[in-house]
Each structure stands twice: as C-alpha cells, then as structure tokens.
C-alpha cells in the first residue's frame, strides 16, 4: 500500500489522496465550459493498465485461477432439503472441475445438436441469463466466452415488459434460467414481438409443467444438465476448439434500470472489466479468500468482484436466493472479502443496536462505552482494541459470520457516516466506500484502506482512471469553489448526529467539522480511462451524450474534492437519483403520476440517498380540496386554506390519493411517497421556485423546503 503525498494547496501537512495534473483546468469562458484540473491516483507508481496480472479477458481470468489453484474451491452452493429446509455446509467445485464443466457446456452449446444459438442481426453470438445468482450463472457465462460470444444478463426481478424489450432489442435466441423465470419468458414470446427468441435452458430441470408452458409459446426447453452432458461426451470423442474473445470484444450487456423510458444496454468489454479490476490492487485478493455472492450478478459491481476472485484463484459461495436467509449463508461461508450495499449493512446495524437497547442496563452501557473507545481509536489510526474486541465485538462478528472478514467495500449508494463508523468499530478491519457507474465498469474512486479516520466521501481516483469536475453553472457548482458549505449547505445537518445518542464521537470521524472548511472545487464528475464502456447498443445519440469527444464519461453526478483530495458526492445533475437501497428513482415520472389527482395542484418529489423512501412537497388545489373538506372536515367552510393544509385529515387523504394513483400507474413500492408536506402557496416564479414556463427548479426547491424535508424524514413512515 502507498502513503499519500503531502499537498501544499491548503496545508503543508495534510495528506492528499489524489494528485492534480497541472495546467489541465479550463476557465468558465472556455467554449467547452469550465472545469478543474484533472486528478489521478495519489500513488506515484500508478498507471492505467489494460488488464489485471496479464489477464485481459474474463475467459483468461478463470483459467489463470485454475493454473494458480487447480484443486482449491472455486464455486460453491448449499444443498437444501425440500421437506425440512435444512441446508448443508457449502459444497464447492474446484477450479479444475469448474473449468471442465465450462468446457463441456461450451461444447454442448456449440456441437450438441440442439441448435440453441443463432447470431443476431449484428453478427453477435448472444446468450441470455435470467435467474438468481448460482454456480450455473458463472458456468453459462464462461461457456459462451469459449465460443467468442457475449452475455445478456436479466435481473431476476424484471417483469415481462422489460424482458420483452431486451429480447427484442438484442435479438436473443436463447436464455438460461430457472423454471421460476420461464413464465415471464413465455409471456414475452407469446406476444409475437420476439421472433428470434426460440430456446430456453433450464438449470433446475425440465418438468411436464415447464414443457407445457413453453409449448404454448412455441419455445424449446432443454435442461442445463443435458447440454453439459452432451458436451462432456463430445470433448473426448470429437474434441472441441475454443474461439476465445479479444480484449476489445463485448463481454456483456449491462441494462440500466430504465426509470425514464426503455432501459439502455451498456456494452462492457472484457478489457473494461479487467482494467477496472487492475485498478483495485490496494484491496489485494489472495487464493485463500472467500466471497459470498448475493448482490445481483447483472450489476457491474458484483461482476467486477467475481472477476477479481476468479483471476486470483479465490472461492465464491452463492447465497440461496432468499434475502431472509442471507445471514445464515454468511455464517456458513465466513467470507474474507465482502462487498455490501447500504441496505444490507443498515439492517444489520439497526438489528444490533435494537438488540442492545432491548437488553438495556449494564449490557447497553458497555456497548456504548466500547463504541466510544473504538471510535476514538479510529481517529488515531487504530482499528482494534485489546479489551473491547475480546469481550464484545469478536463475539458479535462470529455470530454474524463476519469474524474472518479482512476488508469490506460499500458501493451502489451512499453509506451514512454513522453506519460506516459503526462497522469499522465492529469489524476492526478496513471498511471502504467506492464510487463508479455501470458505464465506467464500476471504476471511479475508492476510499483507501489506510484512511479509516474519515467518512462521508468515496476516496480518491482508481489507479486505472482520471477524474475531472466540470462546472454546472445552472446549479451553482463551479470548479473554482473553495468552501465546503458553498457546495453542500446540508452537509452539516446530514452528518452532525452522533452514532448513538449517549455517545459523543470525535468530529473528525463523524464529519461534523466541515461547515466552512476549504474544498478544492466542485462540478459534474467525469471519468476517463480503460474501464469506460464502448457505448449503448443501437443508441448512438445517447452514447454521444454520455461520452464526449475527449473520451470523458459524464456521470450526471455532482461532486466536490475535499481538502485532502477525496471525492464527495453532493448532488445529481439530472432528476434521477438513488435511494439508500440502490434503487433508481425518477422524480419527474412520479410527479407526473401523482399530479393526476384532483386534490394536487403542484408537487415536488424529493429523495435523499441516505434514506430508503421518498417525500414530497404538495401544493393542494384549493377548489376541489374545499369541496372534499365540506364532507370530511367539520366546520371547514370558514377555515383559511393555510390552516386547512395543516389538518391531518387532508394530509392523510392526499397520501391515500398518492397510493391509489401510484398503484394504478404501476409504480414500485420504493417509488411511492411515504410522507408529504402540504404547502398552501403555489410554487412561483417570484420565489424563483419555477421557470417562466413553470418547470421546477429542483435545487431551489430543495433549499427552500430544507426544514420541512428534514422534518418529514424525522417522522415515522406512512404505512402506505
């Protein structure tokens, strides 16, 4: 690991976690707009590479793992008894066995006589994968790579409409899935809009019911085991030649969530993924490491982790697919490296804290004292504590199956400072937060394992990329900004509460001391380097909007450089954002739905990436509201409208309307508003809350109603 150099910009002694490239900034008057200096990794020896450890394709990655660790565990699962639900310990196939299975599957797909694969109109050999994480997911993917093909993953939660669109868009002929997903595939095929789609490979076997369902839609079904068996016979008798991919070939389609219209298919090459893996060498993976795969495999974050594991001959255990059993599976696996998303660790954190509070007395006091002591230790660079680890934290870790973890990495959505600090105290190992996009192969920035005293940021640039912040003048974000609170006025409120109400924590850890502290500019985060994707499939216009003529990937996220050169995400340039559980939300789409209510005149939907639900500022339409109030609120005829908007009866009716319209229009649960504030006065141009054409000015609305938003997030959620 490298020690960050000392910078002279703000302090002669402050370490810097990124390095500026001199004379690369542009003034606001520049034809292409203003920007700050380009920044790179703080490591003076870092240089972007086109692969990891000489490996430039995922095909090579598995075979390198086999060469390093031929007899060691590769892919593992837990067998479950159908009658009792009892699950065995993890059972692993070795690297040698997995490569043999991949080769057999490839031969079966290519020469097995089932005629499952056809090239699409662009000459691409595609294989769809539509199921929860499992061994067969990886084996199927590696098998198509043996044929020079590409995977098209589907999230297992996708419904028939999105499935239909992807089948049409790609021209897929064959999809690997379980019987659970066959119904949606059959429904999509039955519409007659996916003429090239004709075959399904079932990993859990073909039953009479599955055959009947497929036959109705004119689909061929065959078992995964049969294709693998056919290939295992072909190889010794006839032999089978591979046509491995080139590094520049597309490894996978990564479809976006499609919150505004149809999803976009990001084309990710082998070189993209392997160069991204190379940039994470500060989080070194060893052949003795274990990873539990529970984050969806279609997500680029999990794919990157899998690539690192197989390249280094490490073990991958797959959870059983049931989130309620995840802790049991973690205990059975005892991972050494664990990537997480805030939704998972937030639940673990809340459960532990609630459990300690329920015990009360000496136990609760001891717990808080232990946290306070370890938090103070973090500020001094100490992750462990001889007393508190032995008598408390080691026992909790073991109960959770986290006693072997040596590094935890959080991604997908922001992790709150209090939860970050809590897990550093609990685990006593580096807990880092990273930032990246699908289009950048998840490579952007990452907190350094040696920097465990600071929170609220996503670290410095990956070694494989460079980052620049581009001015967003319409939102007031300029690369010349020098004050933290100029960039993010709510940062103190977002981070000022202590981890536990009875514990006063060090301000350095909790990020409470930044109000007015220097920063080093802000703007839209743009990334450049080998991990940046090839473009969107069949969408040159969107590709040009995303990658500019200097090869910069425009993220749409707004960030700032902290005084020590680390990146902090502070806003979203567009009206799409993530909630804490990682779900994308389009505010404008939801506003268009709820504004259908006669009771609602205007609405502003807001979501905080540290929160799991949405809130809204609603301006009721006075005339229909008064008509409703006459029948539902006694003595309302002479009540001023401003007072009427304070009544719980009206607020509950508006929430009920929102629920009805959200359900009617097919919004997800996370897209349904859980709390509202009723504003009696319209959003006006005079208050600078809307444009002359009455388009919402979201930044101004967020600032104007910051108090009400904070109050709504402090209230119990609606049970809608």
Image (tube, grey):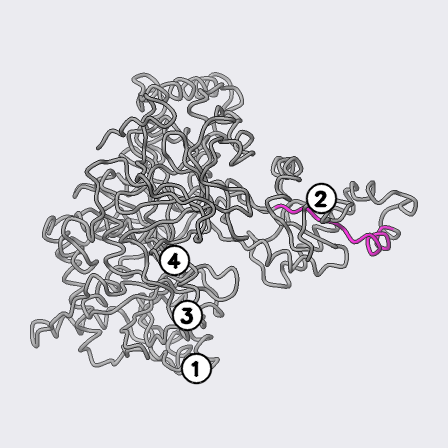
Cα distance, mark 3 to mark 4?
26 Å
Q: Which mark is residue 687?
A: 2
Q: How far across and down, in percent of the image, does residue 146 sit? A: 18, 67
Q: Quadrant of the N terminus?
A: top left
Residue at the (64%, 60%) spot, across then down: 592
Q: Nearer the viewer, mark 3 or mark 4?
A: 4
Residue at the (29%, 26%) spot, across then down: 6
Q: Is residue 490 left or right of residue 427?
A: right
Cα distance, mark 1 to mark 2?
60 Å
CB within 8 Å, label 1 to label 2: no
Q: Which residue bears the numbered disc 4? A: 548
Cα distance, mark 2 to mark 3?
44 Å
Q: Is residue 530 magenta?
A: no
In the image, residue 275 above or below residue 197:
above
Cα distance, mark 1 to mark 3?
21 Å
Q: Which mark is residue 166?
A: 3
State which region is magenta: 615-629
Q: Nearer the viewer, mark 1 or mark 2?
A: 2
In the image, residue 679 above or below residue 505:
below
Q: Which residue bears the numbered disc 1? A: 216
Q: Residues within 10 Å of mark 1 (few under 14, many from 20)?
A: few
Mark closer to the chain start, 3 or 4? 3
Q: How far across and down, in percent of the image, does residue 483 sit? A: 49, 30
CB within 8 Å, label 4 to label 1: no
């Amino acid at each position: 690991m490298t020690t960050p150099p000392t910078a002279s910009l703000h302090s002669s002694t402050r370490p810097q976690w990124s390095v500026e490239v001199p004379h690369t900034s542009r003034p606001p008057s520049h034809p292409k707009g203003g920007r700050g200096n380009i920044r790179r990794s703080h490591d003076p020896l870092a240089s972007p590479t086109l692969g990891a450890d000489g490996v430039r394709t995922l095909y090579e990655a598995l075979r390198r793992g086999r060469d390093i660790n031929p007899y060691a565990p590769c892919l593992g699962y837990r067998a479950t008894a159908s009658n009792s639900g009892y699950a065995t310990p993890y059972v692993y196939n070795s690297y040698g066995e997995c490569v043999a299975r991949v080769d057999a599957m490839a031969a079966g797909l290519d020469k097995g006589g089932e005629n499952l694969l056809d090239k699409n109109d662009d000459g691409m050999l595609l294989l769809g994968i539509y199921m929860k994480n499992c061994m067969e997911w990886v084996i199927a993917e590696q098998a198509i790579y043996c044929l020079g093909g590409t995977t098209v993953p589907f999230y297992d939660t996708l419904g028939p409409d999105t499935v239909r669109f992807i089948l049409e868009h790609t021209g897929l002929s064959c999809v690997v899935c379980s019987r659970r997903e066959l119904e949606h595939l059959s429904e999509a095929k039955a519409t007659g809009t996916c003429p090239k789609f004709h075959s399904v490979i079932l990993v859990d076997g073909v039953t009479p019911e599955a055959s009947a369902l497929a036959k109705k839609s004119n689909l061929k079904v065959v078992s995964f085991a049969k294709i693998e068996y056919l290939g295992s016979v072909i190889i010794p008798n006839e032999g089978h030649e591979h046509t491995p991919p080139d590094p520049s070939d597309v490894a996978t389609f990564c479809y976006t969530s499609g919150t505004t219209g149809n999803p976009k298919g990001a084309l990710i090459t082998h070189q993209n993924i392997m160069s991204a893996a190379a940039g994470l060498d500060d989080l070194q993976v060893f052949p003795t490491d274990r990873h539990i795969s529970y984050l969806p495999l279609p997500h680029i974050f999990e794919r990157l982790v899998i690539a690192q594991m197989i390249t280094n001959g490490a073990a991958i255990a797959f959870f059983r697919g049931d989130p309620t059993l995840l802790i049991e599976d973690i205990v059975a696996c005892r991972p050494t490296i664990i990537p997480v998303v805030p939704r998972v660790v937030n639940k673990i954190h809340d459960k532990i804290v609630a459990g300690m509070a329920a015990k009360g007395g000496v136990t609760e006091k001891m717990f808080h004292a232990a946290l306070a002591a370890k938090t103070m230790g973090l500020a001094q660079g100490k992750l462990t504590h001889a007393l508190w680890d032995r008598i408390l934290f080691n026992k909790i870790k073991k109960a959770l199956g986290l006693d072997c973890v040596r590094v935890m990495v959080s991604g997908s959505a922001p992790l709150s400072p209090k939860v970050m600090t809590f897990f550093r105290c609990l685990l006593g190992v580096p807990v880092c937060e990273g930032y990246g996009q699908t289009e950048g192969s998840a490579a952007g920035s990452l907190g350094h394992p040696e920097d465990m005293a600071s929170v609220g940021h996503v670290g410095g640039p990956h070694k494989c990329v460079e980052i620049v912040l581009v001015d967003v003048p319409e939102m007031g974000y300029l690369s010349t900004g020098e004050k933290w609170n100029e960039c993010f006025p709510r940062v103190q409120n977002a981070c000022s509460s202590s981890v536990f109400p009875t514990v006063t924590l060090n301000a350095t850890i909790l990020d409470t001391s930044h109000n007015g502290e220097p920063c080093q500019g802000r703007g839209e985060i743009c990334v450049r380097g080998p991990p940046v994707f090839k473009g969107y499939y069949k969408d040159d216009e969107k590709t040009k909007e995303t990658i500019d003529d200097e090869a910069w990937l425009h993220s749409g996220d707004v960030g700032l450089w902290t005084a020590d050169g680390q990146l902090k995400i502070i806003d979203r340039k567009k009206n799409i954002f993530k909630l804490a559980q990682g779900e994308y939300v389009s505010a404008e789409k939801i506003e268009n739905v709820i504004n259908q209510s006669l009771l609602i005149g205007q609405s502003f939907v807001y979501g905080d990436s540290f929160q799991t639900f949405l809130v809204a500022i609603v301006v009721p339409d006075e005339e229909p509201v008064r008509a409703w109030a006459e029948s539902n609120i006694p003595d309302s005829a002479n009540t001023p409208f401003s007072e009427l908007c304070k009544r719980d009866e009206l607020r509950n009716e508006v929430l009920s309307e929102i629920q009805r319209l959200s359900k009617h229009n097919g919004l997800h649960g996370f897209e349904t508003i859980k709390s509202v504030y009723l504003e009696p006065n319209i959003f006006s141009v005079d208050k600078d809350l809307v444009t002359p054409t009455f388009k919402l000015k979201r930044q101004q609305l967020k600032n104007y109603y910051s108090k009400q938003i904070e109050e709504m997030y402090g209230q119990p959620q609606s049970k809608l």
